[in-house]
Image (tube, rainbow, N blue to C red):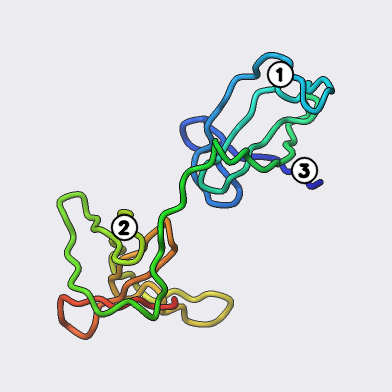
Amino acid sequence: MSVIKLSKGGNGKFICPTCGKELNFIEGGAVSIVNGKVDMSSTLPKHTCEDCGVYYQELLGSGYYDSFALPPEMRKPKRHVLPTGDLKPTKLKREADGKCTCPRCGERMDFIEGQPVRIVNGKPDMENVKEHFHCPYCDSIFRRIASTDYFQWSET
C-alpha cells in the first residue's frame, strides 16, 4: 500500500500522478455487499483515471490518497499500437489545430516546435532542437527525415 498526495491542475481538478491527465470525480454510492460482507469503500468518492486503470480514494480525510485497480468494465479500451519495426517513413502534415494522426496508434499527435539547445546537468540537451511530432497516448516521437516532408519513428 502506497499513499500519495495528489496535486491539482490549473482548473482545480486532481492530476493523475502516472500519466498527468485530469482525474474524473465519482461521488460515493450506496453501501454494497461483496462476498457476503459489507463494503463501505463504495460510499467514498473516487478520483479515476481510465487510461491508467486506477482510482484514488482519500484516507480518513487526511489529504493523502491510496490507489486501487479499476474494475475491467470502467477501464478505457486499449487501442492497438503497432510495433516500431513495422513503421515505415510517413508523410506527416500539421492540420489547422497543429496536430496530426499518429501512424502508430491512431490518436492525435502534438507538433513540437524546434527550441534552442538547453544545458541539463552540465550537458547540452539536443532532444527538442528540431521540430517533431509527439504522441501522448503511445509516447512515440516522429522526427523529420532531412529536409523532406517524411517523418520516421524515433526512440527519443
Q: Earlier in the sequence, mark 1 or mark 3?
A: 3
Residue for point 68% across, 14% down? 30
Q: Are marks 1 and 3 in contact (CB under 8 Å)?
A: no
Which residue is situated farthest in the front direction here? 36
Helix, strand or loop at label 2? It is: loop
Q: Earlier in the sequence, mark 2 or mark 3?
A: 3
Q: Position of residue 67 (x, y in %)?
A: 70, 41
In the picture, which quadrant includes the C terminus? bottom left
Q: Position of residue 111 (x, y in %)?
A: 28, 61
Kind of residue at disc 1: Thr
Q: Position of residue 128 (x, y in %)?
A: 37, 72
Q: Nearest the camera: 153 or 39?
A: 39
Helix, strand or loop at label 1? It is: helix
Helix, strand or loop at label 3? It is: strand
Residue corresponding to mark 2: 106
The tag on residue 3 is: 3
Q: Nearest the camera: 97 or 121?
A: 97
Which residue is situated farthest in the bottom direction here? 146
Q: Are marks 1 and 2 in contact (CB under 8 Å)?
A: no
Which label sits in the foreground, 1 or 3?
A: 1
Residue for point 17% across, 64% down? 93
Residue corresponding to mark 1: 43
Gap in angstroms between the C-alphas marked 1 and 3: 19 Å
Lateral position of residue 155 relative to residue 16, left or right:
left
Above or below, comparing residue 94 to residue 156 in the picture: above
